[in-house]
Amino acid sequence: MAGHLTHWGVFEADSDGERLTSVRPWRGDPEPMALIDNVASAQHHRTRIDQPYVRRGWLEQGPGPARRGDEPFVPVSWETAVGLLSGELGRVYREHGAESVYGGSYGWASAGRFHHAQSQVHRFLNCLGGYVRHVNSYSLGASSVLLPHVIADMSVLDGHATAKSVLVENTELMVAFGGLSPKNSAVSQGGVSRHNTRTWIGAARARGCRFVSISPLRDDIPAEAQAEWLAPRPGSDAALMVALAQVLDAEGLADNDFLDRYTVGYARFAGYLRGERDGVVKGPEWAAPITGLAAGTIRALARDMAAARTMVTVSWSLQRAEHGEQPLWLGVVLAAMLGQIGLPGGGFGHGYGSTAHVGEAACAYSVPRFPQGRNGVDTFIPVARISDMLLSPGADYDYDGRTLTYPDIRLVYWCGGNPFHHHQDLARLRAAFARPETVVVHDAFWTATARHADIVLPATMSIERDDYGAGQNDRVFFPMPALTRPHGQARDDFAIFAELAETLGVGKEFTEGRTAQEWLRQLYREWQTHRGDEVPDFEVFWDSEQLELPIPDPDQVLFARFRSDPERFPLATPSGRIEIFSETIEGFGYPDCPGHPVWMEPEEWLGGRAAAQFPLQLIANQPRTKLHSQLDIGAHSRSAKIGGREPVRLHPDDAGARGIGDGDIVRIFNDRGSCLAGVVVDDGVRVGVAQLSTGAWYDPDPADPSFCRHGNPNVLTSDRGTSRLSQGCTGQLALVEIERFAGTVPELAVDRPPAIS
Ligand SMILES: Nc1nc2c(c(=O)[nH]1)N[C@H]1C(S)=C(S)[C@@H](COP(=O)(O)OP(=O)(O)OC[C@H]3O[C@@H](n4cnc5c(=O)[nH]c(N)nc54)[C@H](O)[C@@H]3O)O[C@H]1N2
Ligand SMILES: Nc1nc2c(c(=O)[nH]1)N[C@H]1C(S)=C(S)[C@@H](COP(=O)(O)OP(=O)(O)OC[C@H]3O[C@@H](n4cnc5c(=O)[nH]c(N)nc54)[C@H](O)[C@@H]3O)O[C@H]1N2
Ligand SMILES: [Mo]
């Protein structure tokens, strides 16, 4: 029996050497998650990649642009695969240079720090001269660019958020834009040891904290919160926040001492609230028809916020949308007007409820990681501009005050991510994936991305290799000894890269002469020496269940030092203060992101013209029964499917108006594409909203790649950036229509391997 860390929790398992015979939540987890059930059921599923494969056309005609995604694959030996791939890498680096290789390889891969897939592929490509990389994430595209201009880097807001323990003791009112979702806080990058969402929210409530959840879904906050539920039109939060700010301003409730001492630019913003330029006072009466909330509700909420110790928290989802910068910036501004930033339990939070780690106090030491080396290429893209890059080499685009140019990519290397899960407008991505000369994918499963590759290499799952790991701000460091042998001919990414590197003459640079086991020891020992305190030797750690990490300030309060002395501890913004108006951003001159936050109508929302044709707001949020697309064929994920399709939730009025009932298979569509889904009728969904979470493996109709038979919402979402400032992903919201699916429901193909010839 041994424990194993995943991004969604720790489990203990018995194994017969080949498979897990029983899986139980780790004894230390007070709120274990059923997501752990996906692992054992997926391990030997027929969609597991059992050996290396090459796309037939690539094998026969060689590298070049091609319609990828529907040709058969040819099984090849490891020797052949390594020979072909090293030859092709050699050719591309020689003929086109490192700037023609896209190795950004975005994705979550698996927990375990040494076998972290992105670190592996980045180090390998760096040994060859480097690669075009990505910056930022799908999670926080707008946040990572906007917030450093306005208040602080994401690492501060993320890693040093006021601790949940402090909220439990001090917060009187928690206003949660986007809720505090129990499904999201099941997960954290790198792993979660002790889930605590229901516990801390229940404790805060028992002490008297009032929760207001502002979200299209009632279950975006746990029942323990006994929350009041406000459901404005999705995408209209900025208007609601502007109106809340207007009430504070007009009724003398804004904390002027705080605004004077700790912020810049309030006067400009107040002029906007007061309608000094356009004659429109942006109060509750103005916001009511935009948001669909009653003016009285908005006014009362603003007054309550000013009267209590209030935490304004904005979920990450709000910025994963058109103009996603605005509600985020307004959240900061509202908190600044309330004057409680830096006080226990008050102020601003970003992502309580978005993942498990936000609100966990920072550990003294992060755990060892595999060094990636130096990238010889400077060129990068904001991560969600992948299709634009592949489709438009040489084109210019705006980003954070700069004009950048897309490189000309010949080879795409993906290891540990699934762009045919994560990217928007999948028909367009498929066209983009037809452009490179070669696409290489390592994965454990025949995901849609593997099916769009030329060379497919089978990776081990984390249960099949020795590793160790801990999540960000998670206080438990786990040894992760292999629980079973690898499936089929699967190899660790490290072993694959080690052999490729050897063949390409950079073996020594990549491995430094160490095996994986030797690396684990070496990295641990380096870590041990750099730590000031007593840490057990590797051998002791490896044989133990876990190692608890020290937490220097368990009751951390975000920006407490800044509040105590803003001259001595200024923020890293240009003014050193919170920027309600940013000269820098104003100076960029972007019409879609002016110098202070505003309400800007998105194109796809229920209040706009496009809603006449597509009258339902699709919420493409994170899935409850899995992490992204991972292990979608696992037992827990499958248990939620309807007729094998991803569930879509609809309000009874919207279902009734379309003659749709529980369990029906429907077609969801807009101008970009369509997909099937199985209906769940639920009055916990706002009227006018259809919730189809991400994660169903993309299963395109062979005749029409914009039609997914399985229920991947990214055939419907739009591939446009949040704004020219941050170019973040806008996948959360889109407009759609839904109809009952007429005819015979087509069989799925993505739950079996592709055609093998
Ligand atoms: N419409 C819409 N789209 C979204 C979002 C949204 O809100 N709406 N959210 C976005 C967000 S926030 C994110 S983070 C992305 C997530 O997108 P991804 O991180 O790309 O999604 P995953 O399904 O986690 O992909 C990880 C892949 O790595 C594979 N893998 C696991 N372990 C290993 C390993 O050790 N080696 C190798 N080689 N492979 C491994 C898994 O099998 C899986 O295929 O999706 C984004 N997409
Ligand atoms: N179970 C599970 N947990 C996960 C993940 C997963 O795949 N599965 N993924 C992880 C990752 S990578 C990330 S980045 C985080 C993401 O964390 P978030 O971005 O916070 O998560 P989402 O589920 O996309 O969105 C949260 C909620 O926001 C609400 N919402 C959507 N649009 C609007 C809007 O316009 N206004 C308001 N007020 N609310 C809105 C939706 O109802 C949605 O349920 O989750 C992490 N946690
Ligand atoms: Mo994410």
Image (cartoon, helix red, strand yellow):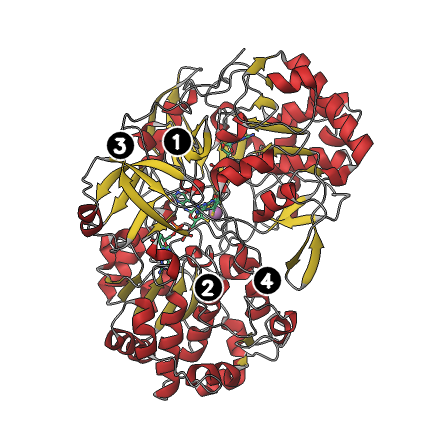
Q: Residue at x 61, y 40 (%)?
A: 369
Q: Give the mark nearest the N terminus, 1 or 4.
A: 1
Image coordinates of residue 486 in percent, x first then y, are: 51, 18
Question: Mark 1 or mark 2: which comes first in sequence?
Answer: 2
Mark nearest the camera among 2 and 3 is: 3
Q: Circles 3 and 4: CB distance less than 8 Å?
A: no
Q: Is residue 691 above or below residue 702?
A: below
Left-right relation of 1 to 432:
left
Q: CA distance from mark 3 to mark 4?
A: 43 Å
Circle 4 sits on which residue? 725
Q: Circles 3 and 1: CB distance less than 8 Å?
A: no
Q: What is the distance, in whole Å, between disc 2 and disc 3 at their CAs?
A: 56 Å
* Amino acid bearing label 4: Leu
Queried on whether the Cβ of the residue with tag 2 lies below 8 angstroms from ligand 2, the answer reads: no
- Counting residues from the N terminus, which is met first, the one under dot 4 or under dot 2? 2
Q: Which residue is mark 1?
A: 632
State the residue position of label 2.
Answer: 556
Q: Is mark 3 within 8 Å of ligand 1?
A: no
Residue at image mark 3: 742
Whichever of callouts 3 and 1 sits on the residue coming sooner in the sequence is 1
Q: At label 2, which amino acid type do we have? A: Gln
Residue 696, position as x, y percentages in the image: 39, 35
- Between circles 3 and 4, the one closer to the viewer is 3
Residue density around tag 2, few if under 14, some if 14–19, many if 20 or more, within 10 Å? many
Residue 169 vertical placement versus 37 (above, below)? below
Cα separation between marks 4 and 2: 31 Å
Element marked by disc 1 = loop
Rounded to the nearest angstrom, the CA distance separating label 1 from label 4 is: 34 Å
Residue 24 visible in the current orientation:
yes
